[in-house]
Amino acid sequence: MKAFRNRVRRQLDPGRPVHHPHNTTDGLSLGPRDGLSVDWHCHSTWSDGRATVAEAVRRAAARGVTLGIADHGLRDNRRLGTPSQLASYVDDLRRYPVLRGMEISVGDVPGDVAGAETDVRLAELDYLIASLHIIQVPEGPVHATRYLNYRAGLYPRYRPTLARYNRRGYFDSWLRAFEATVRHRPVKILGHFCLLPELANDEGIVDLSRDPEPDAVAAEWLDATIELCCRYDVAIELNSKSRVPHESFVVRALEKGARFSLGSDAHQLHRVADLSYGRYLVSRLNIPRHRLLSVANIRPAAEESAAG
Ligand SMILES: [Zn+2]
Ligand SMILES: [Zn+2]
């Protein structure tokens, strides 16, 4: 149990030393540009991933997948928050044939300190993923990561963070935080979004045996989230690690015109380029290819041949 807790803590608290292996990816290029073959969400030793960037690149290439490195940054990573740290990260990723991304939390909006300089550095990345991690409600913080990690097999069971909290307060806090984040940051992807099971109905009943079925109030909130994604051109990630969003949400987002991206959310080498959940949904729901975020959406063709 202790080992298990440490493993979870490592995943949530990027605090281990960074290693910078020399470039050992010679001869590899960026890879396919089709959205079905791009893993936009992979962690490395720049945050809490176990694999180095070079190792992850080689694994993705062996699987015929183009890799996007998206390590935890800004408030979620004390080693990847300042403008100079961001500059080192960008410089390092430029050495590899990867898409240069970063994962931040929804709600991590610019502060006054070093805001402009941070923005300059973030603009050098190809994209940001803004993810559902912790949402502050009047009753306290709701750690959505608990449910996501439960679904990823990292927790043996799931218990909501707070015994009871007002779900309308959560919905409002989420929408405010999400809109502020996509308005102020160059966000291209909404990471591992889901409806927490206790929010699906007003009674707060958690049923883990099936996907949460939203009642009218929850469905309205889900629609509002999809509409923000459409308005700000943010792709909805199909996340293999936690197998979210739930299928009914993806169906609805497809109807409403949203785009999608695939991501492994790999923290270990063997998970790199695992796009199984996204590919399953693309095939099952007949999601057209042009609705998947592709390399061309992020990088002009002229840059394709450039190193990384
Ligand atoms: Zn995350
Ligand atoms: Zn992640």
Image (cartoon, rainbow, N blue to C red):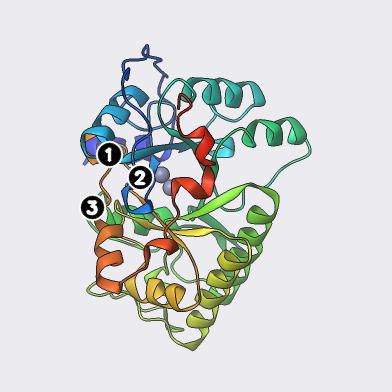
Q: How crowded is mark 2: few (under 14 residues within 10 Å), some or many (20 or more)?
A: many
Earlier sequence position, callout 3 versus callout 1: 3
Give the answer, above or below, for where 234 lies relative to 254.
above
**Please, what secondary structure does the residue beneath circle 3 have?**
loop
Image quadrant, ligand 2:
top left
Q: Do the residues labelled 1 and 2 touch (CB within 8 Å)?
A: yes
Between residue 307 and residue 80, name the one nearer to us. Answer: 307
How packed mark 3 is, by other alpha carbons closer than 10 Å (few <14, some 14-19, many 20 or more), is few
* Residue shown at 35% from the left, 59% from the top: 147
Tell me if I can see residue 193 in this picture: no
Q: Is mark 3 within 8 Å of ligand 2?
A: no
| Residue marked by disc 3 | 153
**Amino acid tagged 2:** Asp
Residue under numbered circle 2: 39
Q: Mark 1 points at which residue?
A: 272
Q: Which is more foreground, mark 3 or mark 2?
A: 2
For the residue pair 117 and 207, the one nearer the viewer reads as 117
The local secondary structure at tag 1 comes to loop
Left or right: 36 in relation to 109 = left
Q: Is residue 31 above or below residue 201?
A: above
- Disc marking residue 203: none
Q: In the drawing, does residue 71 fall left or right of residue 34?
A: right
Mark 3 and mark 1: Cα distance apart in space: 17 Å
Q: Do the residues labelled 3 and 1 touch (CB within 8 Å)?
A: no
Marks 3,2: beta carbons within 8 A: no
C-alpha gap between disc 3 and disc 2: 21 Å
Which residue is at 37% across, 11% downward? 22
Label 2: state its secondary structure.
strand
